[in-house]
Image (tube, coloured by chain):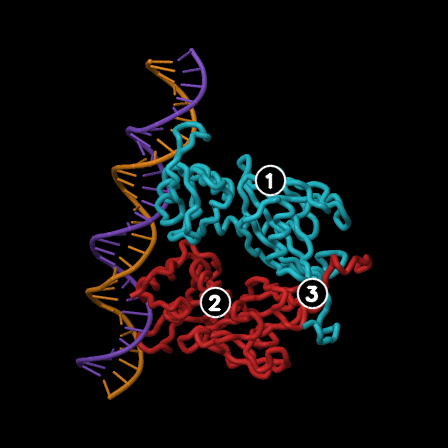
Chain colours: A red, B cyan, C purple, D orange
Amino acid sequence: MLCVVYSPSDFPPFAVTVDLVVLTVRADALCALLVRRGEAPFRGRWALPGGFVQVTESVDAAAARELVEETGVSGLHLEQLGTYGEPRRDPRMRVVSVAYLALAPDLPVPVAGTDAAAASWVPVAEVSSLAFDHSVILGDGVERARAKLEYTSLGTEFCPAEFTVAELRRVYEVVWGVSLDARNFHRKVTGVEGLLEATGRSTSRDGGRPAALYRRGAASVLHPPLVRGVGA
Amino acid sequence: MLCVVYSPSDFPPFAVTVDLVVLTVRADALCALLVRRGEAPFRGRWALPGGFVQVTESVDAAAARELVEETGVSGLHLEQLGTYGEPRRDPRMRVVSVAYLALAPDLPVPVAGTDAAAASWVPVAEVSSLAFDHSVILGDGVERARAKLEYTSLGTEFCPAEFTVAELRRVYEVVWGVSLDARNFHRKVTGVEGLLEATGRSTSRDGGRPAALYRRGAASVLHPPLVRGVGA
DNA sequence: CGGCTTGTCGTCGATCTGACGATAAGCCTA
DNA sequence: TAGGCTTATCGTCAGATCGACGACAAGCCG
């Protein structure tokens, strides 16, 4: 149907890319997946993984494809974070970038993609200036993750398939940067309908008394929300 | 700096547009600003206002510009809703559209823009199939507005500069489609720090006992949130 | 076996919530 | 002008929830 010709002034040419903010919790720190750029511009600088949207795929599909290409993992929660379209954000040409947020459990160290010199998990607290406007995008992604932990079950996305209440609590503590009362957290989290699903098994991988193992439940919105209160 | 030439397969050409979900509360109904398309495709069908992003402006600026062009009002709250990029969402060519959400007080009937046959406020409950994927976008916008009313002060954006507690309550009732207890709502809303700012004046435009007039306060996030509970 | 670690259950007072009674303060009509 | 209607605002009360924290359970390690 691409048959009608329009004036170029009505349809200025844009390139559309996707950028991925992939977060995980490892070694008691909130980490982002970053790649070191192998090409100009910003060669050698850290950047968010991402790439161009192809003409035949949807923007969402492009994000999922890039995520698999960069992390080797599929099936992660992936949501749109926002679109960044300042005229000069890419020095080469007019590029509009759609950013996505993904939360991952502690994955093995990622493999560098085709056009990246290196890929690794970097604690967000240690991230300095990234290529393009990626520092802004990363900041928005972290803030979105913090906010959504409060009223959705997204925290479980940071955990492996089976996890203990304490592991989930550490996710909240790391992402929010607070310390939470273990007993109140346990009461609250096990009291939310549909958030956790007991497996019947338990583990003592954290030392101390064995803890019950849970799976993610069906609930996605939390009523009432876990409030980001002060801890002990 | 648009000096480097790249392969067209790496930079497929896209058109980028903005679409606006402009909501208001009038006559006890949640209404959206719609335009009747004056040109193909979808000529004669209702659609969201919007237009093409120019090369020299940012995407956010394009949204603000279109909002002024379509409503004649500036200074409204405007936030990104999401980006819609299915390959065939526009039959003419590959178009990626960035949708924005704006909340407006009860404005005068809008004037039709240059390329629209008509513009008017339509109750969202009566909206049938819109052009392109605009029905989906409108639905997402309404859902976003509903959700944000719960934990932000966004409800006041639907009200004029000075408003009564009852007017704000009616916004919540209309947007959520529930009925709220006037006394509890009053207690809660006046108890939230920074949400309302007393003007000292009062009005009896709603009949009955005169009500105090308030201005929007500085608070934007509500702690604790107004929960979307059941009413009477 | 006794100490250490971590997990889980319970208690308690402060706070918040929703349901609803009571009163205030305007307008309208007779 | 009084009584009735409307809407606004304040108060009360029982139940739910919250954070602080005590108590105990159940593993490991020496």
Element under disc 3: loop
Residue B169 lies, in percent from the top left, at: 44, 40
Distance of label 1 from label 3 (alpha carbons)? 35 Å
> Are dots 1 and 3 on a single chain?
no
Asked if residue A111 can be seen in this view, the reply is no
> Nearest the camera: A144 or B161?
B161
In the depicted view, which residue is nearer to us: A108 or D11? D11
Chain of the residue under the numbered disc 3 shown in the image = A
Residue at the disc numbered 3: A14
Mark 1 lies on residue? B123
Q: Secondary structure at mark 2?
A: helix
1 vs 3, front mark: 3
Q: Nearer the viewer, residue B187 or A8?
A: A8
Circle 3: is it few (<14), some (14-19), or many (20+) Cα within 10 Å?
many
10 Å crowding of disc 2: few (<14), some (14-19), many (20+): many
Callout 2, which amino acid? Val
Residue occupied by mark 2? A142
In this rendering, which labeled residue sits more in front, label 3 or label 2?
Answer: 3
Q: Earlier in the sequence, mark 3 or mark 2?
A: 3
Q: CA distance from mark 1 to mark 2?
A: 36 Å
Q: Secondary structure at mark 1?
A: strand
Distance of label 3 from label 2 (alpha carbons): 28 Å
